[in-house]
Amino acid sequence: MARILAFDSGIGGLGIVAQLRTLLPGVPIDYLADTAVFPYGEQPDILLRQRIVTLLGQAIARLRPSVVVVACNTASTLALDSLRATYAVPFIGCVPPIKWAADRTRTGTIGLLATRATVRRPYLLDLHARFAPHCTLLAHGARGLADMAEQAFRGLPPDHAKLRAELHGLFGQEGGENIDVVGIGCTHYTFLLDAMREVGPTGVTWLDPAPAVARQTARVLAECAAPGATVAPVEGEQVSFTAMPADLPALLPGLARLGYGPDAPSLFQEDEALPHIP
């Protein structure tokens, strides 16, 4: 039976889960959040890569997914190659939508909102050079947006003043007034898109890669499925956290909207010690 594992440092990947529910109704989707070291964008690369590879190895052995969605830009740009080299299961990652932004811009200046780790990594420079060399790329590593998104998923609207301050880090750069397309380089920001459209500059197109990631997952899953295989009803789906959120009851309504029951959340029990990040 086909089964999907979606992984992120927090609730960001649940935006992709929502898209998958529409595309693949009935396919079980387990979710793993590495909340013990959230946010990923603030962690050291070497230890974080080791932790991601070890943690997902344990989850794969336990849940036996058909495909794994690394629903996190930081984890994808850092560990996707290592994961594919280590495990046989197919991995679908998330990368900043630079090519998409370059295809949509009219001014030739595109923006990216992402974690500081994604913005500083050479991977982004490579994407720019390969897919948008004719464009000016302005990026902002937004420390506060992931926390705002976590609260938004819990039903708490973002503080517009704080949101404007984060957006100023992008649009307030030299040439920022020319940005007409902004790519979302962190899956958490899906839950802030409406608010960013409201408080951000007018006339800006905001690009959320979540639907495209879900479509790619569906394609890969179809290639993996045995001929004639049928999808069984959803049962036994798990939502696991490496550290249980203190406000778990506040998460339950959002999880319920995605089809997870109140008994789905659990603490991820480590089979072996994960690399420690101070």
Image (spheres, helix red, strand yellow):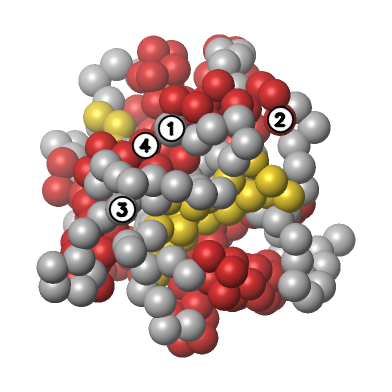
Would residue 148 be seen by someone viewing this image from the given angle?
Answer: no
Q: Disc 1 marks which amino acid?
A: Leu
Q: Where does residue 225 sit, x and y in percent of width and height? A: 23, 70
Does label 2 or label 4 sit earlier along the sequence? 4
Find the distance from the CA under tag 2 to the CA under tag 3: 29 Å
Q: Earlier in the sequence, mark 4 or mark 1?
A: 4
- Quadrant of the image occupied by residue 217: bottom left
Q: Mark 1 or mark 3: which comes first in sequence? A: 3
- Give the quadrant of residue 230: bottom left
Tell me what residue is drawn at x 39 percent, y 13 percent.
Answer: 198
Total count of labels: 4
Q: Nearer the viewer, residue 171 or 85?
A: 85
Q: Amino acid at mark 4?
A: Ala
Instruction: Give the foreground label among 2 and 3.
Output: 3
Q: Is residue 111 left or right of residue 265?
A: left
Q: Residues within 10 Å of mark 4 (few under 14, many from 20)?
A: some
Q: Residue at x 50, y 48 (%)?
A: 237
Question: Is the residue 192 above or below the residue 79 in the image?
Answer: above
Q: CA distance from mark 4 to mark 1?
A: 6 Å
Q: Quadrant of the N terminus?
A: bottom left
Disc ID at residue 232: 3
- Residue for badge 4: 18
Decide which of 221, 162 is in the foreground and name it.
221
Q: Amino acid at mark 2?
A: Leu
Q: x, y (%) of residue 96? A: 37, 53
Q: Residues within 10 Å of mark 3 (few under 14, many from 20)?
A: few
Q: Nearer the viewer, residue 149 or 269?
A: 269
| Label 3 secondary element | loop
Instruction: Kindly identify which residue carries mark 1.
Output: 258
Front in this rendered view, residue 72 or 227 = 227
Where does label 2 land, which residue?
A: 248
Q: Residue furthest right?
A: 278
